[in-house]
Image: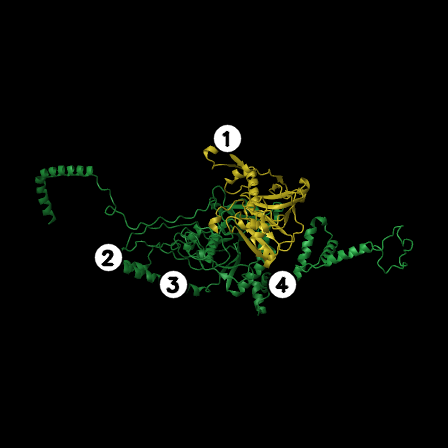
Amino acid sequence: LLLLRRDYRFQRVWFWGCVQGVRGAYYIAEGLGADRAAPRSRLYSLNCVEWSLLPPATEEMVARAEQLKGRFQGDPSFEYECTEINAEDAERLLEDGKELTIKEESRLVATIEQIDRAVGIIPRGAFVKTPLGSVHENRNFEGLSLTEAKKLSSYFHFTEPVNLKNKTLLEKADLDPSTDFLDSLEHDIPAGSWTVQVEKGGTVVVLRSLLWLGLTFYHVPLTKQYGYVYFGTGEKNLDLPFML
Amino acid sequence: ERGHGPYQPQEPGYGLYQPGYSPYDDQIPDPKSRTLAIENAKAFLLKSSTTSGLNLYDHLANMLTKILDERPTNAVDIIENISKDVKWAQFQKKMDTLRDEHEILPTFEAAEKLKALFLKANGEGDEELEEEIEETPLPNVMETAFYFEQAGIGLSKDESYHIFLALKKLISAQPIRTCRFWGKILGLEMNYIIAEVQYHEGEEEEETEEEEGTEEGGKGMGEVEDEDEKNEKEDEPPKSTYKPPPVIPKEQNGTGANKYVYFVCNEPGKPWVKLPPVTPAQIVCARKIKKFFTGRLDAPVVSFPPFPGNEANYLRAQIARISAGTHISPIGFYQFAEEEGDEEEEGGGRRDTYEENPDFQPPSVAEMVESLSTWVHHGQSILKQGRCVWFNPFQKSEEEEEEEDGEEEKGEEPDELQQEVGPPLLTPLSEDEGIQNIPAWTAQSSTNLIPQYAVAVLQSNRWPGAYAFAAGKKFDNIYFGWGHKYSPGNHAPALPPPVQAEYPSGPEITETRDPTLEEELAFKAAREEALAAAEEEEDEEDDAEDDEEEEDD
């Protein structure tokens, strides 16, 4: 990963996780430049030695990949056939000249994007927004305390906030605009889609997402250590409402 | 502060000032107004705040001290935060006692429990030590963890070691013959650590006797009810003809799905709890529902169809399904014990027992990875009925047959159930059917770079989280996951059954449309025609009727 950082001139590179396919697994790394909220560049590898850059995710890619179900195959050039499109869409696509098949690479990109968007979380206070709009790491972030770390409201989604504007004015008054500019986890639908566990007698707090099974977020309270990683099959858990 | 600064040439006292020699050294010199201003400013800074009891002077001094000590980069950008931190630090000291009490509870308690694991049990003599070293049912958890780590699966070393010690404690507490770390199931509030054990023979008799007693009581009740039904009078509202499907008895402890006994605990250090044996009804129901485990064994499982039992039973049922589906071993490791007895009694030559093969020659790792036929299931698969050995609920025992000779059975005769046959024990994995186009297992070698020490690893695709490894003569299975089967489609819960018909509908109860006027007239006309025709035939029929009456007599 260090070599990756040098070659692509990232400021930070980290190991995002592993998506397990039937015949092999994809190891994913993400890299960032100076602005932490910018779209991230993602790279994948089959053996952790040679990394290839993934194309950035577009909305269309995400929409098409959502229709695909089933495991990843483990072969990046594998092509899926879209069997669930009704006749109208099929005609439209054919007219545009696009294929009805989706490559596994695009599906991979779309899945990573969805996971990051849906369940990529950070502790509250870890990032600050400057008045200019760019987002930086907060060097004064000393970590959450143990009581704070057990509450879901101390964690934010690291994506464009959706619910923030809907809060009542009373709630907004309590927020600190430099640190509270993201959606917190409290209002995730369905309620209870995160499990919070304290391990090793309180030295580590682990959050696991139940919507994307395999996403694990850890934080050591009162230190700056936190992070999340995904190890799983890359499928959304659509049975979640039945399982709670 | 400038204080005794250099005097300008035109000011009085310029030539006179020599450090240490001036007659005015001990007096505040001329810029009296400036020093007065400085004093005023300092006094202002020293003024205590009315709300917090701090004063700005001390606060600024603390802040600057902190900055100079720590020398952060770009201090000017974070000066407000530093200020806030300093103020916060003041408060921390005051609330120290409260904070300490709060933090003692979770962290230290856990540490106490773990410490208990590390202490040896009291009263260990030398003899016991020797016994332990020779044959201990304790599995070598660390060794297994090492092999799994080669494949990238497993818990941290700390946790593995704690589990190791916890298993040791379990063994010393219960009479156990074999023990194995089965795996870890994640839950919402807490996780489960599961150990699979087998008791020494003869240790479980007490429990089975109690259960047989309750079963006999149940049968007795059933017979009494039958008699009541036969005596029913016709005035009473019709008794429901609903016969609940016969309860399929669970398998004996030590056989089939209940071959192993499972102990769970939430964390190493907490006491081990024994899970109750599993009944077929629970397995059948567990197949239809998909629920997360909360981590508390007494939690109810709210689902449809309603699950008979609480979370402990659901957990046991899932463990049974996972064990049956994913416990595999290299081919040849286990072989069938030679049997002298009849195979007919067992319904077609099923073999239930296996033993280790002393002449086992392990195939190479490359072979184990390439083809799935080098692995076999040693966990018996569970039939649709929920048992491993098929049970015919309508097969009457000898006693019942004698009683019921000559009596008619009430209600409809139940259909004969087809005998269910599952794949026999020790079938190779290549027979496992995949899901859609995905094979049931994914095989990988742990490393491509060092083939001499590589480990063959299998991941199950049907039960995500089940892994097995083999390296030479060693192999093991383990499970880390949420405890659910993989289903490519969405889980659709069973719909409630249609509302039962209250009464059988027949022509006498159903309403029909009243005939319209035209229909009535038409009917009348037709009847008159028929009468007219009948009169003609009466003469002919009279003879026929006489004949019939004679025959009846």
Which residue position holds label 2?
B235
Residue B259 appears anywhere in the view = no
What's the residue type where badge 2 is placed?
Asp
Which residue position holds label 3?
B214
Which residue position holds label 1?
A94
x, y percentage for residue B550? 9, 47
Question: Is A54 placed above or below B481 here?
Answer: above
The CA span between labels 3 and 1 is 69 Å
- Horizontally, is B110 left or right of B381 in the view? right
Disc 1 or disc 2, which is closer to the eye?
2
The CA span between labels 1 and 4 is 69 Å
Check if mark 3's residue and mark 1's residue have beta carbons within 8 Å: no
Helix, strand or loop under label 1:
helix
Residue at x 24%, y 43% (from the top left corner)? B512
Question: Is B536 placed above or below B165 here?
Answer: above
Disc 3 or disc 4, which is closer to the eye?
4
